[in-house]
Image (spheres, rainbow, N blue to C red):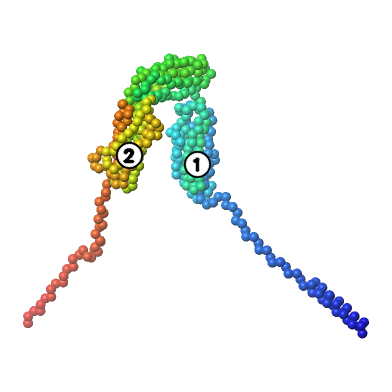
Amino acid sequence: MKTHLAKYVLSMGWLAGWLSWNAVADVPPIPPPPIAPAAPVAPAVANAGGPRIQFETPTYDFGKINSGAVVKHDFIFTNTGTATLEVTDVRPGCGCTTAGAWTKTVEPGQTGTIPIQFNSGNFSGPVQKNVTVTCNVASQPQTILYFKGTIWKAIDVNPTYAYFTPLADAQTNDTRIVRIVNNTDEVLTLSAPESANTSFKAELKTIKEGKEFELHISTTPPFGPGTVQGPVTVKTSSTNMPVITVNAIVMVQPVVLAMPSQITLPGGPLAVPTKMTVTVRNNGSSVMAVSEPTVTVAGVEAVIQELQAGKVYSVNLTFPTGFEVGAGQRAELTVKTTHPQYPLIRVPIFQTPRPAQQPPTIPPPPAVPAHALVTPIPPPPPVPPKAQ
């Protein structure tokens, strides 16, 4: 009996193990959930919509030329965008450089030109000029173009003018030096300088025989107010430059100067308080005090501030709301000084005239229908019946 029971238990254990293994072996594994593919990434857009401007080269090097030669060059550009390119302005940096008729409208993929001309007269040595191009490209509204090169002169004269700025009360003999250099292989000879104005004297000095010279130009005061000028000429042995001309200029500076020399206000009456500043400068050698600022029209506040002791002052003016210079009224700022020659400074005040008022517009009468303009004809009175 025990033997049969042992065999039965052993058989049941073996059967349970087989069923357990078979269940595991026959059931297929559950696969992991599929991985969703990554969303496609849009490629970076290198050139968004709109016009684009691209020059073949923004710099033109014309090399070495003789002074006085005129250089012409066409800057070529392409619209690399997707919309119409509009070149609205071409502005050279100085009067020696000018722009011709440029291409103002360029479709996508097409090219245009900007003709530039440079006059090398009055220049020597290395030079660089610029031209500003304005267009409708939002990210690049302006492009700078460059003209550069070297200007060669047979004879260099530097500077080509002698400029003097003496004070009205402190005029002395002053001298300016002009260097003359011969760049050719030939020996240069110069004649004695001649001055067309007796206010200037000129003397020639040789630094290096046949190659380098100095022209000394001096003033002979006194000078009255304003400007005095005159040419100083030197004859040469060079066929490239037979005559050298240097302009001598004297501009006498006032000892006491008010800037600006007049005040201009917007049209009145002023809508808001308006501030103005007048600077009083003492160019003399002695110190000067400034006081008692006064405006001939009431209501204006005037305050003096010393910016540089005895030399520079500012007069700060505040014109109130509603200020207006009346018709025929004289308005000016006056300031007293301690300078014996300029005891009172006057600065006139002007106001822009009011704009003329337009008469009120009278609306036209309403349109009347054509049939309303015709007076209706009344019907004839009835004819009484004839008597029997």
Residue 245 seen in render = no
Cα distance between the residues tagged 2 and 1: 47 Å
Residue 151 seen in render = yes
Q: Quadrant of residue 201?
A: top left
Q: Residue at x 18, y 68 (%)?
A: 376
Judge whether 181 appears above or below 88 on screen.
Answer: above
Give the foreground label among 2 and 1. Answer: 2
Rendered location of residue 367, percent (x, y): 25, 61
Q: Which residue is mark 2?
A: 302
Q: Which residue is mark 1?
A: 143
Q: Residue at x 51, y 27 (%)?
A: 125
Q: Quadrant of the N terminus?
A: bottom right
Query: Farthest residue toward the bottom?
Result: 1
Point out the tag, 2 or 1, that comes first from the N-terminus.
1
Question: In front here: 275 or 30?
Answer: 275
Rendered location of residue 224, percent (x, y): 32, 23
Instruction: Name the amino acid, label 1.
Output: Thr
Q: Quadrant of the C terminus?
A: bottom left
Q: Residue at x 44, y 18 (%)?
A: 216
Question: In front here: 373 or 210?
Answer: 210
Q: Residue at x 34, y 22 (%)?
A: 223
10 Å crowding of disc 1: few (<14), some (14-19), many (20+): some
Secondary element type, mark 1: strand
386 relative position to 315: left or right: left
